C-alpha cells in the first residue's frame, strides 16, 4: 500500500513539476526573445524543446498519473491512439531537438577561423524548417501506433501491469522490420551528431580553460564569454539526456528479453521516460539564471 502511494505521488510530482518547469522556461525565453535586441537561435530551440517536453509530460505523464490512481478506463479507443501516438512523436522530436541544440551551440562557440563558423544560422527564423522536418519525420515513423493501440478492456487480468491505460496489440513482422530500423537509424544519426558536437564543445572548453589559467598566471582579469557559459549549460543538459535515454534503452531491452513480468522495471522505465522532460527545465533555470533575469526585465 505504501509502495503504491509512492508510485502515485512520484508520477504526480514529475508530471506537475516538469510541466510547470517547462512552462517557466518557455515563458522566460520568450521574454528574452521579445525584449532582447537580437533574436538568438538558441532561445528558439530551447522554447521548442520546452514545448516538446510539455507534450511528453501531458501525453504520457498525465495518463500514467490517472492510471496510477486507479482510473484505467478513462480513455476510449481514439483517445488512446492520440495520446500514445503524440507521446511517441514528441519523444522523437525531443531527441532531434536536443541534437540540433548541441550542434548549433557548438557552431556558435567555434573559432572565427573555423569552417564550422560558416554554418552559423544568420537568423533565428532559419531554424524553423528544422522543426517542421522533425515533426514530419517522427509523425511518419510512429504511424504504426495508430493501428496497434487500443483502449484496455474491463478485464484487468489481461494487463501486464496495473498502471496500463492503453493496450499494445501484436504487430506483423513486416511492420516491425520497417519501423524498428527507421527508429534505430533516426537515433543513430541524431545522437551521433549530438555526440560529435558535444565532444567538439568539450575540446573548445578545455582550450578556453587552459587560456584562462594562462591569463590568471599572468595576473590578467578575464571573464568567461556568455557563449561559453551557455555551452557548459548545454553540455550538462546533454549529459542528463544521455543518462535518461541510455537507461531507458537498457531497461526496455531487459523487458523485451525477459520471460517474466517485472513491474519494478516497468515503473523504472516509465520514470526514465519522464525524467529528462522533468529535469531539463531545472537544469536550464539553475545554470542560466532564467528566473532572476526575467523578473529583472519585468
Image (cartoon, rainbow, N blue to C red):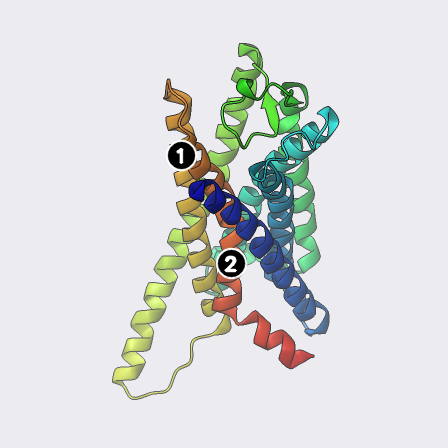
Q: Position of residue 246 (x, y in %)?
A: 40, 39
Q: Position of residue 259 (x, y in %)?
A: 37, 17
Residue 264: give its label. 1
Is residue 261 positioned above or below 170 on the image? below
Is residue 3 positioned above or below 141 on the image? below
Q: Quadrant of the C terminus?
A: bottom right
Q: Position of residue 281 (x, y in %)?
A: 54, 59
Query: What is the quadrant of residue 2 in the picture?
Result: top left
Query: What is the quadrant of residue 136 in the picture?
Result: top right
Determine if residue 295 is in view.
yes
Can you name the residue that lies furthest to the left here? 217
Chain-order first, disc 2 or disc 1 = 2
**What residue do we see at 37% from left, 58% from top?**
202
Residue 58: give its label. none
**What residue do we see at 64% from left, 40% from top?**
59
**What residue do we see at 47% from left, 67% from top?**
287
- Residue at disc 1, secondary structure: helix
Can you name the residue that lies furthest to the bottom here? 219
Residue 105: give its label. 2
Is residue 6 positioned above or below 180 on the image? below
Amino acid at each position: 500500500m505504501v509502495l503504491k502511494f509512492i508510485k502515485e505521488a512520484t508520477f504526480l510530482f514529475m508530471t506537475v513539476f516538469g510541466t510547470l518547469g517547462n512552462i517557466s522556461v518557455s515563458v522566460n525565453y520568450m521574454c528574452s526573445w521579445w525584449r532582447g535586441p537580437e533574436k538568438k537561435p538558441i532561445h528558439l530551440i530551447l522554447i521548442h524543446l520546452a514545448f516538446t517536453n510539455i507534450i511528453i509530460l501531458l501525453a504520457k505523464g498525465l495518463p500514467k498519473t490517472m492510471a496510477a490512481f486507479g482510473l484505467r478506463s478513462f480513455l476510449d479507443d481514439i483517445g488512446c491512439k492520440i495520446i500514445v501516438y503524440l507521446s511517441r512523436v514528441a519523444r522523437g522530436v525531443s531527441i532531434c531537438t536536443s541534437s540540433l541544440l548541441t550542434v548549433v551551440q557548438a557552431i556558435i562557440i567555434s573559432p572565427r577561423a573555423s569552417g564550422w563558423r560558416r554554418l552559423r544560422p544568420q537568423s533565428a527564423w532559419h531554424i524553423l524548417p528544422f522543426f517542421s522536418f522533425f515533426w514530419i519525420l517522427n509523425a511518419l515513423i510512429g504511424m504504426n501506433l495508430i493501428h496497434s493501440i487500443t483502449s484496455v478492456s474491463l478485464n484487468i487480468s489481461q494487463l501486464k501491469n496495473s498502471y496500463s491505460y492503453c493496450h499494445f496489440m501484436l504487430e506483423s513482422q513486416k511492420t516491425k522490420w520497417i519501423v524498428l530500423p527507421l527508429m534505430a537509424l533516426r537515433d543513430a544519426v541524431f545522437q551521433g551528431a549530438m555526440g560529435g558536437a558535444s565532444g567538439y564543445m568539450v575540446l573548445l572548453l578545455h582550450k578556453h580553460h587552459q587560456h584562462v589559467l594562462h591569463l590568471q598566471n599572468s595576473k590578467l582579469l578575464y571573464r568567461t564569454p556568455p557563449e561559453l557559459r551557455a555551452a557548459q549549460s548545454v553540455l550538462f543538459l546533454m549529459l542528463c539526456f544521455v543518462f535518461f535515454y541510455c537507461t531507458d534503452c537498457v531497461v526496455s531491452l531487459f523487458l523485451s528479453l525477459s520471460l517474466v513480468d517485472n513491474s519494478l522495471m516497468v515503473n523504472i522505465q516509465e520514470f526514465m521516460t519522464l525524467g529528462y522532460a522533468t529535469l531539463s527545465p531545472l537544469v536550464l533555470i539553475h545554470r542560466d539564471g532564467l528566473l532572476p533575469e526575467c523578473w529583472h526585465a519585468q
